[in-house]
Image (cartoon, helix red, strand yellow):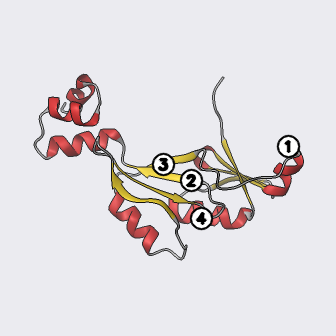
Amino acid sequence: MKLKNVLLVVDDIEKSRQFYQELFGLQVVTDFGGNMILTEGLVLQDRRIWESFVQKKVEYGTHDAELYFEENDMDSFIDRLEHSDWQISYVNPLMEHDWGQRVIRLYDPDHHVIEVGESLDYVARRFLKAGMTPEETARKTQLPLDQVLDMMI
């Protein structure tokens, strides 16, 4: 068995498509009207269709899940957010975790949480380039030393 898609229930499927296309570069693979498959396995489904399937009312904004994207050029991504026509609402502004990974969390138009963070390989390479030893880098990033050493080859 393998996971094929993640489905988000949305109020305005076209608005959500534009959001994910403009800010995250996702493209439409298949458009069934009230159900839209985007690249990277994201599916958008109209709230009314979903509610008819599950016979329950959708409750947005419960903060119980997130979509996670990786972006190593965080400065360009932040610039894209700040210069877009979207009014971005943040869960967390840009921050750096103890292990050195820079992340930001924001809401999509339906208040789903999105996290965008640097890949851990990128973080480790950044530390190595800055002069940290492989051992220091492994301790800081919590990556296995063997994995950090492989980055130096």
**Which quadrant would residue 17 be assigned to in this image?**
bottom right
Marks 3 and 1 close (CB-CB < 8 Å): no
| Of pointers 3 and 1, the one earlier in the residue sequence | 1
Percent position of residue 41, x then y: 62, 44
Element at label 1: helix
| Of pointers 2 and 4, the one earlier in the residue sequence | 4
Disc 2 designates what residue?
Answer: 113
Type of amino acid under label 3: Phe
| Residue 19 circle label | 4
Q: In this view, does 150 lie above or below 118?
A: above
| Of pointers 2 and 3, the one earlier in the residue sequence | 3
Element at label 4: helix
The foreground one among 139 and 34 is 139
Query: What residue sits 27% from the left and 36% below the top?
Result: 141
Disc 3 designates what residue?
Answer: 69
Query: What residue sits 64% from the left and 51% below the top?
Result: 62
| C-alpha gap between disc 4 and disc 3 | 14 Å
Percent position of residue 29, x then y: 67, 51
| Of pointers 1 and 4, the one earlier in the residue sequence | 4
Query: What residue sits 85% from the left and 56% below the top?
Result: 48
| C-alpha gap between disc 3 and disc 1 | 28 Å
Disc 1 designates what residue?
Answer: 54
Type of amino acid under label 4: Phe
